[in-house]
Image (tube, grey):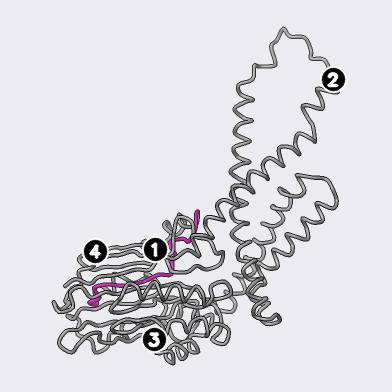
Amino acid sequence: MPAPVRLLIFFGILALLSVLTHVYLYRRIFRDTSGHPGWRKAGVVTLGVLALLMLGSRALAFVLPERLMFVLATVGWTWMGVAIYLILALFVVGSARSLFSLVRNRGAPPAHAPEAPAPAAPTPAAAHTLASPERRQFLARATASGALLATGGMVGYGTWRAFHPPVVNRVAVRLPGLPKALDGFTLVQVSDIHVGPVIQRRFMDAMVAQCNALKPDLVCITGDLVDGSVDELGHAVSALTNLRSRHGSYFVTGNHEYYSGDEEWTQALERMGIPVLRNRHVRIGEPNASFDLVGVDDWAAARSGFSQGYDLKQALVGRDPERAAVLLAHQPANWREASKAGIGLQLSGHTHGGQFFPFNLAVAAIWEYDAGHFEENGRHLYVSRGTGFWGPPVRIAAPPEIVHVTLLS
């Protein structure tokens, strides 16, 4: 199936889910909590605007000034996170209320003893108590209020965590074939930054300063750097020119580079002095003490109809398989085959570790290697949770990270 058709189907399903989500939220937060026409009309307008911002913020880039577009995109992405947690909270609070009612009703004495006389018709006061619209409205308001409070707390924390400096995760890896002279060589990996409408130059400058403070020998950027064109995001991405390391910085493409123009971004990064390893390898170190740094294009690119994609065989052409090698590959795919080909360490990202609950649980179920350090037969894989975020600016149970790797001989 051609890539444009798949994208059309994807966005069609996304639009349908968005409409259903907003209809549900309108019913639970606005319709059920008040019968006032003004309140309900305000709900329709508010949720309609938020739905359009969620789905159409990217299209606004073509008709609105850049600064205004960034503001609206931030609102739209943030609302996506809020909507997800609102649905979860409404479900949890509503389920708890239903469970409480079930337990209470089971604990009530039976009302059908054989010898009891026929019950009298309920008085107006009793009928009001048993089937009161006011009572149902009160419960709906209580449920909506509880869900809003829970959502505010979760999203507030998640947003703080997303924009707070990434954690630095340190790992030591014994790399097969590494010369003794390179024992203690350090790599810093950043991945899945997603520079775009929300992540801009300020975020990038802070990340670069944090990387430089680690004083690495080499910086590796493992894809999904951008969500937009060179013209839109070139200034923010140029912060990478301030990265400092003994052996420079290297980049490999992720799937989002293909959506944003892989050739254009390859040229732009090369102009910034950041080599892009597109199915090729380079030597890192001195002639008598070095290892191979191998880079491949994104695993899904060729399968999505793009002309150039993952080609490990091409990347290894001319390489001595006995030499130490580190592979940069955006997705944690094909690791075992890469290990058999002589790769001692693969650095990947893509999964975001799920980014926020409950998607972290889904990602852990889908991906065999979802996040963190894995080792098999002396070969290593590290999957970064990502340094930025995609979509909602929320990180819960999957904090952003910068990976500091020490190579041991």
| Residue 114 % position (x, y) | 70, 10
For the residues marked 1 and 3, what is the alpha-carbon distance in whole angstroms? 26 Å
Q: What secondary structure is found at the residue carrying circle 4?
A: strand
Q: Quadrant of residue 97?
A: top right
* Circle 4 residue: 376
Q: Are marks 1 and 3 in contact (CB under 8 Å)?
A: no
Which of the two residues, 74 or 35, is positioned nearer the viewer here?
74
Bin the neighbour count of mark 4 within 10 Å (Cα to Cα): few under 14, some 14-19, many 20 and up: few
Q: Does the magenta stretch include residue 344?
A: yes
Earlier in the chain: of badge 2 and badge 3, it is 2
For the residues marked 4 and 1, what is the alpha-carbon distance in whole angstroms? 26 Å
Bin the neighbour count of mark 1 within 10 Å (Cα to Cα): few under 14, some 14-19, many 20 and up: some
Q: Which amino acid does label 2 sit on?
A: Thr
User: Which region shows up in magenta?
Assistant: 340-357
Q: In which quarter of the image is residue 350?
A: bottom left
Q: What secondary structure is found at the residue carrying circle 2?
A: loop
- Labelled disc at residue 167: 1
* Left or right, residue 253 beside residue 55: left
Which of the two residues, 118 or 221, is positioned nearer the viewer here?
221
Q: Does the magenta stretch include residue 191?
A: no
Is 136 above or below relative to 21?
Answer: above
Q: Which of marks 2 and 3 is in front?
A: 3
Q: What secondary structure is found at the residue carrying circle 1?
A: strand
